[in-house]
Image (cartoon, rainbow, N blue to C red):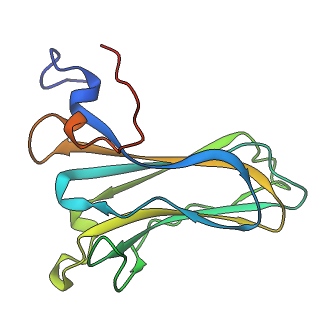
Amino acid sequence: MSISNANLKPSAQAAIVGAIDPDVTTASTVTTGWIDASEFKAFMGVVMAGTLGTSATVDAKFEQATDSSGTGAKDVSGTDITQLTQAGTDSDKQAVINVTQEDLDIANSFTHIRLSVTVGTATSDAGALVLGFYPSYGPASDNDASTVDEIVN
């Protein structure tokens, strides 16, 4: 594996641009905020299922919209994970979703994305992160979410 510039710290190459705090989640849908997809060329959603309740399910996908308030929201095609289930012994597992700018409906002005996680049937532990890669301008850390408290070099 080749790193284009080994002198750059990882935090200069990738940023946390969205998060769903790890927590006990009732049967419901939780989402990150809307993320401006023009700031990075690619994104990675990391869905984390903790202890799943009896018969619980976890689904996740990326959605897209034409602005930061979610106008015209619709799914980003091909980003649904295979459902995680308590019956399938998927507690304490992760799923990764890759998205690039090219996956968005740019022709119809879809410019923002968010990660959506749905916990079904029973309260479960869950959380998620969205990382942005290949920043359009400057170091990636210039675009970290406001919830990022510290970067240790």
Question: Is 104 drawn above or below residue 83 in the view shown?
Answer: below
Q: Which image quarter is the N terminus in? A: top left
* Percent position of residue 13, x then y: 22, 32
Where, by quadrant of the figure, is residue 138 drawn? top left
Residue occupying image coordinates x 25% and y 61%: 36
- Residue extending furthest toward the right: 54
Image x and y of residue 129, in percent:
47, 46
> Which quarter of the rendering shows the C terminus?
top left
Residue 79: image quadrant is bottom left
Residue 116 at x, y = what percent? 52, 64
Q: Is residue 106 above or below residue 16?
A: below
For the point 8% across and 44% down, the residue is: 137
Is residue 102 shown to the viewer in this render? yes
Q: Is the residue 49 above or below the residue 65 in the image?
A: above
User: Farthest left residue?
Assistant: 137
Q: Where is residue 136 in the image (x, y as percent from the top left)?
A: 11, 48
Q: Quadrant of residue 74?
A: bottom left
Q: In this view, does 110 lie to the left or right of 32?
A: left
Residue at the image point whose x is 77% and y is 44% from the top: 91
Q: In this view, does 127 lie to the left or right of 40?
A: right
Is residue 48 visible to the viewer in this orientation of the structure? no
Q: In this rendering, would 103 be left or right of 73?
A: left
